[in-house]
Image (tube, rainbow, N blue to C red):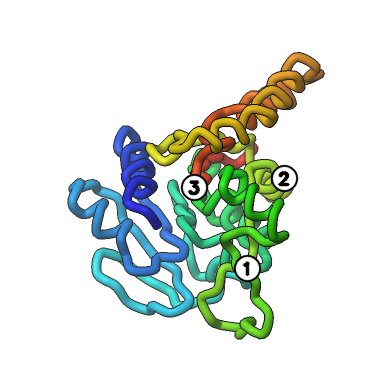
């Protein structure tokens, strides 16, 4: 996970108060280390395929997220799934499990590489493959850390809604801005398309959906960072 994305997540969390949280996958423990520096009162648990103990976590489970969160995990005010969903084959099951383990007013944060990034779309147009995930011919080994599923906002919206969450909103980060002129050009058709859809929307949620898809964070950003709450 890039430093700018970590800073964006921490900046977003900084203005809020949580008593309990779950980091899945917890990886190298960057979230626990960073929150410890902020001296928050958050009690953080973790889940990871490889790690069964790490500094800064109240408890950590070694588990496969394709099977959902551990049954023994409790209810949380916050669940962070940072750079994890691209490695999961059963995302709907995982998101439904997150919904089950979130308090009614809890918050879910998800980050993943954004395949709407102009360079990714250009490479897909030319080669038929995104930069990530790469072609995986004869590279599938269950239990290994491989990037298997590319994600965009419309896909994530569908999965979150099916799992019982509200419309996912965007967290902005510095890499959301285009760096090159050709990237800006590639984003223009999508921006005009979404804006036209906004004017034709029949409901508030449909209008909000198209407003979000026209944002620079989705059209130009290298990372997709969203948050959502359970529908009650």
Instruction: For marks 3 and 1, give the CA distance.
Output: 16 Å
Rendered location of residue 210, percent (x, y): 69, 27
Residue at screen point 34% across, 35% down:
16
Of 212 and 127, which appears nearest the observer? 127
Instruction: Give the quarter of the figure containing the C terminus.
Output: top right
* Among numbered discs 2 and 3, the one appearing first in the sequence: 2
Residue at screen point 64% across, 48% down:
121
Residue hosting label 1: 148
Residue hosting label 2: 158
| Left or right side of 15 for 196 | right
Q: Secondary structure at mark 3?
A: strand
Of 217 and 87, which appears nearest the observer? 217
* Among numbered discs 1 and 2, the one appearing first in the sequence: 1
Q: Looking at this rendering, what residue extends furthest in the top direction? A: 199
| Left or right side of 8 for 93 | right
Residue hosting label 3: 223
Q: Mark number for residue 218?
A: none
Instruction: For marks 1 and 2, give the CA distance.
Output: 19 Å
Q: Tag 1: Cα neighbours inside 10 Å, few (<14), some, or many (≥20)?
A: some
Rendered location of residue 64, percent (x, y): 55, 75
């Amino acid at each position: 996970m890039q430093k700018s994305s970590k800073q964006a997540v921490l900046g977003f969390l900084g203005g809020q108060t949580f008593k309990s949280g779950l980091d899945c996958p917890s990886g190298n423990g960057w979230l626990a280390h960073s929150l410890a520096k902020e001296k928050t009162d958050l009690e953080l648990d973790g889940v990871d395929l490889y790690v069964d103990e790490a500094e800064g976590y109240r408890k950590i489970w070694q588990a496969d997220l394709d099977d959902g969160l551990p049954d023994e995990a409790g209810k949380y005010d916050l669940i962070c799934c940072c750079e994890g969903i691209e490695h999961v084959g059963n995302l709907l099951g995982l998101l439904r499990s997150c919904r089950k383990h979130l308090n009614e007013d809890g918050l879910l944060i998800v980050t993943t590489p954004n395949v709407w990034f102009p360079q990714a779309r250009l490479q897909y147009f030319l080669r038929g493959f995104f930069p990530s995930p790469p072609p995986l011919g004869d590279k599938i080994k269950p239990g290994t850390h491989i990037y298997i599923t590319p994600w965009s906002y419309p896909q994530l919206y569908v999965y979150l809604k099916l799992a019982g969450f509200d419309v996912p909103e965007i967290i902005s980060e510095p890499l959301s801005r285009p760096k090159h002129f050709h990237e800006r050009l590639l984003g223009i058709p999508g921006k005009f398309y979404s804006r036209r859809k906004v004017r034709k929307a029949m409901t508030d949620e449909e209008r909000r959906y198209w407003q979000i898809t026209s944002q620079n964070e989705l059209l130009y950003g290298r990372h997709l960072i969203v948050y959502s709450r359970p529908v009650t």
